[in-house]
């Protein structure tokens, strides 16, 4: 079942009480043709390849063994189709969990962008022409985290996109968004965000 939901607009963590054992599992969608060829895939609704569908199905055993009190997905097909094929139930769409808006770099490879802007790096520049800045992306990540924390659940699953989830992990541990450059997350790979002595922590990554 897929349900719509409007994401939170603020991130007032001071009013949120979170149990030590609370976990947020994150899952990047399976392979797409654009991702396989290195094209920046932001808001374009590219479907999974057959290999991407197989990657999602292969997750059923791992995810099926875990009880999730809340399951959220980006509304883009590649994300919620991954969630469906992975066998999770009760999927709610979270509009703010879409991928970084790459603006006019959408659909281009890094090599093609470097031809136009020598030395370019998404992380160093922190902005996409006609799209989002890195801080705007980080703000969306914080809003999604805030929405999940306010649900007061024990374990949640978020199915979304590579750059989005990498930045979300940095915001979970309250670090600068540029740290996401070092948090690689492959297609259909899982991360677990939790706590250590009530401090937010990355328990598992790119699993």
Image (tube, rainbow, N blue to C red):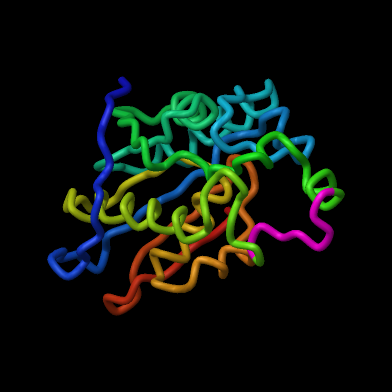
Residue 82 falls left or right of residue 88: right
Residue at (56% x, 25% y) in the render = 45
The image quadrant of residue 37 is top right
Which residue is nearer to you in this view: 31 or 145?
145
Residue 135 falls left or right of residue 183: left
- Magenta segment, which residues? 116-123
Magenta stretch secondary structure, dominant: loop
Position of 49 relative to 119 (above/below): above
Residue 184 falls left or right of residue 82: right
Q: Estimate the x, y position of residue 179 in percent, counting from the top left.
A: 56, 70
Residue at (50% x, 66% y) in the render = 177
Position of 69 relative to 183 (above/below): above
Q: Quadrant of the N terminus?
A: top left
Residue at (26% x, 55% y) in the render = 146
Which residue is nearer to you in this view: 1 or 103?
103
Q: Estimate the x, y position of residue 93 in percent, counting from the top left.
A: 34, 31
């Amino acid at each position: 079942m897929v349900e719509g939901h409007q994401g939170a607009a603020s991130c007032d963590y001071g009013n949120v009480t979170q149990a030590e054992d609370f976990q947020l599992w994150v899952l990047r969608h399976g392979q797409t043709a654009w991702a396989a060829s290195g094209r920046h895939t932001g808001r374009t609704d590219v479907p999974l390849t057959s290999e991407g569908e197989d990657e999602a199905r292969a997750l059923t055993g791992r995810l099926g063994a875990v009880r999730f009190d809340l399951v959220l997905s980006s509304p883009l097909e590649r994300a919620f189709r991954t969630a469906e094929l992975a066998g999770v139930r009760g999927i709610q769409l979270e509009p703010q969990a879409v991928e970084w808006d790459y603006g006019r770099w959408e659909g281009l490879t890094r090599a093609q962008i470097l031809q136009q802007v020598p030395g370019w790096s998404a992380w160093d520049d922190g902005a996409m022409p006609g799209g989002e800045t890195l801080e705007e992306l980080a703000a969306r990540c914080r809003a999604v985290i805030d929405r999940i924390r306010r649900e007061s659940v024990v374990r949640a699953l978020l199915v979304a996109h590579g750059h989005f989830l990498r930045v979300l992990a940095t915001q979970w541990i309250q670090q600068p968004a540029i740290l996401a450059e070092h948090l690689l997350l492959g297609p259909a790979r899982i991360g677990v965000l939790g706590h250590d002595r009530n401090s937010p922590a990355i328990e598992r990554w790119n699993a």
